[in-house]
Image: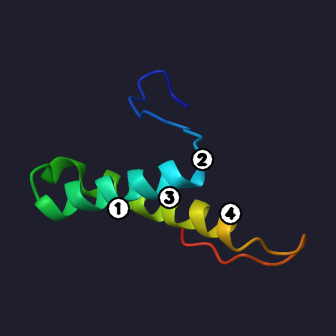
Amino acid sequence: MALDDDTVYCDVQMPVTQGRELLRLVNALRDSGGHPNLDTVFEHMQLELTMAIDIVENPRPLGAVRPTKH
């Protein structure tokens, strides 16, 4: 990372119930259109939360291939 890089990274951990609640909140914020400058951030949050919730609710055997969407 360059010294002039202003990118912010955030790694947040929570129980799946809170993850679902946060996903609902992010969905509502994005759907409201009230924060257009954050639309891509909300989109990435939706993807990350959806994948994380799926991993917890539908665990796959070790070594199983998981599709990536990046």
Res 67 → quadrant? bottom right
Report the residue at 29% width, 62% height from top: 27
Lower position in the chain sequence, tag 3 or tag 1: 1
Q: In the structure shown, which secondary structural element does the residue marked by tag 2 occupy?
A: loop
Q: How is the image coloured?
A: rainbow
The residue that mark 3 highlights is 49
Marks 2, 3: nearer the viewer? 2
Left or right: 5 as drawn, with respect to 65: left
Q: Is residue 14 above or below residue 22?
A: above
Q: Which residue in the rendered view is the most extreme toward the top?
A: 3
Question: Separation of disc 4 and disc 3 at Cα?
Answer: 11 Å
The residue that mark 2 highlights is 15
Question: Separation of disc 2 and disc 3 at Cα?
Answer: 11 Å
Lower position in the chain sequence, tag 4 or tag 3: 3
Q: Nearer the viewer, residue 16 or 35?
A: 16
Report the residue at 52% width, 54% height from top: 17
